[in-house]
Amino acid sequence: MKRHDQGTYEYLRHHKKFPHVWCAGCGSGIVMGSILRSVQKLELNQDDVAIISGIGCTGRMPVYMDFNTMHTTHGRALAFATGLKLARPEMEIIVVMGDGDALAIGGNHFIHAARRNIDLTAIVVNNSIYGMTGGQSSPTTPLQAFSATAPYGHIEQPFPICDLAVSAGAAFVARSTVYHVTQLDSLIEQAVRKDGFAVVEAVSYCHTTFGRANKLKSPVQMMHLLKDNSITVQAAKKLGDELPEDKIVRGVLHDKEKPEFTELYDQVIEQAHGPLPPRKRKVRRGWV
Amino acid sequence: MNVQLIQGNRASALGALAAGCRFFAGYPITPSSEIAEIMSRELPKVGGKFIQMEDEIASIAAVIGASVGGLKAMTATSGPGFSLMQENIGYAIVTEIPCVIINVMRAGPSTGLPTSPSQGDVMQARWGTHGDHPIIALVPASVREAFDLTVTAFNFAEKYRTPVILLMDEVVGHMREKVELPEVGPEEIVNREMPTVPPEWYEPFGNPASDVPPLAPFGEGYRYHITGLLHDPRGFPTNRLDEIQPWIERIFRKIDRNLDEIAMWEEDGIEDARVLVVAYGATARSARQALKIARARYGRKVGLLRLKTLWPFPEELVERLADEVQRVIVAEMNLGQIALEVERIVGRRKVVRVGRADGQMVSPEQIVDAIRAPRPQATRRAAPAQR
């Protein structure tokens, strides 16, 4: 039988960078594996791929991956990636962020990158908490959950990441969990393939901080929760109005063709400058 | 002959294009917006890219991202936006990514006096981002110099792999002068050094003899890691003292050892001077006039030191010139920022501050009064404007 992770080994910086910083049982590594498998499946050249991250547990992800990698400032990964994408439109740029990174300090960049519809793949690893700083409330901490800064229970509403991305103008929006790895692989692959701003919410967990404060100390418990608490897009559609609010709907939620920013900018250049030599095209071996 | 009547902001934008700038990201703010407007029109004509970002934080981030992609990149802003950029300026310093930040200074703090002139961001340019770091800041005093120093700013950024700040005051930014802009030939333009070694040997943050490691753009086969964490020669985070210490020493050394090239200034009438006026930017224009008045009308022996490079501060130069005079007057559109540096070097008793922060230029008369004053006034703070 073919192992699931066969071949992704070559995409890791295994000489120096392991063991990783994440707690045993963390979901971040699963998301990283999904990214690697997607890149492998698309047969992308490592030199043509850039992984950009912000700050936090997810921010540490790029250092382990053997691509062009950049660990930027808190919340600003998408803005850095926007500059890089304009300079190198032929590159596949994957931006990995945590929920606090993407939606609190980086919320403005998130909605504007979506509005601009620039060809970036934004992966938001949502663990509902600030893990690296010790478990403070994040923009996706559920109502009434406990955290280091909500000792009496959280009284704010969580951000619906995917709804936000759709309304802000993203071309592709999808969601899955770190339990449903095969689906996550496929969603990330579709997101990278999409010419436009693509968002994948990877629902993860933090058993170390969130779990400890909410009687869910073991990653196994967390995994069960993701399994029991999620529902496919198709099943959710069938339920219609009867879909419980706390269900994690997983699958492709939004996929729309719309003009992409760097391609529009090429037209601006042609208008101002005259015809350009053909742009170096993306290498897309293995695409069906 | 390329003679034009243009403002400093335009000269600066044209200087950037001449220096090879091919990326601009910015956010509108008076009095710098003309630079963004000109770049949005001119950049696509030369195949470059312009983008208006959602704020100044994103602007400087996109500039750094584009520079990592191999383009010469810049942004332009004013005080409030410059404050927002500080964290990512620190990122560019730590990751040694070349870029140029133009700050057309207006009166602050906060929203301040939009948009009266000021030179109040001098210390922010030096210490605005957290942590110890070197920085280069240049300051033009005329429209032509706005062009020239923007070219120089790009050259320094590329040569030393560092952000360079061009501190223009609103007077120079918006002032129109008749200028003849030069053709900037390829021999006058510095481009970052590219690696010549195979990718597996490449050390993007290594320790070469020049102290400035070559910088490969992303996407060219040199896969490496860039991080704002302190890092080893390969770019990977480290907390080993034997890797951190040489790195800190190197990023300071690459600027300090090239002070002879980076420090730029102009002297006027210092041969027989008994009083030295130190000024920069638009204030140096008032100082030049004050010099004429003081010499012609009052027979005072006055010299002028006009600084074009504020950071790193030319300590030895100021020390040498100040030794020859009885008094040093520091004229600036703030309440004594460069004066702090001069006092540190010369000693407080010999230094007179002439400054104002009310959105008005320092007038030649104000400086003449200070030149004529019998002995240094023991001012801790510069007196508010008296007119």
Image (spheres, coloured by chain):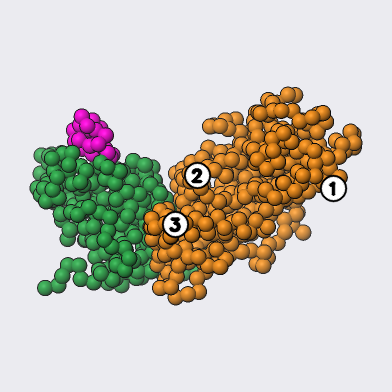
Tag shown at residue B63: none
Q: Of helix, strand and loop, which one carries label 3?
A: helix
Closer-to-camera residue (B290/A97): B290
**Chain letter, colour orange:** B
| Magenta stretch in the rendered image | A136-157
Q: Amino acid at mark 2?
A: Thr
Q: Position of residue A189 (x, y in %)?
A: 26, 62
Q: Which of pointers 2 and 1 indicates the residue nearer the eye?
A: 1
Asked whether the residues under marks 1 and 3 belong to the same chain, the reply is: yes
Display colour for chain A: green
Q: Amino acid at mark 3?
A: Ile
In this image, B109 relative to B261: left or right?
left
Mark 2 near mark 1, Cβ–Cβ under 8 Å? no
Q: Of helix, strand and loop, which one carries label 1?
A: loop
Q: Residue at x 74, y 57 (%)?
A: B2
Q: Which of pointers 2 and 3 indicates the residue nearer the eye?
A: 3
Mark 1 near mark 3, Cβ–Cβ under 8 Å? no
Of marks 2 and 3, which one's residue comes earlier in the chain? 2
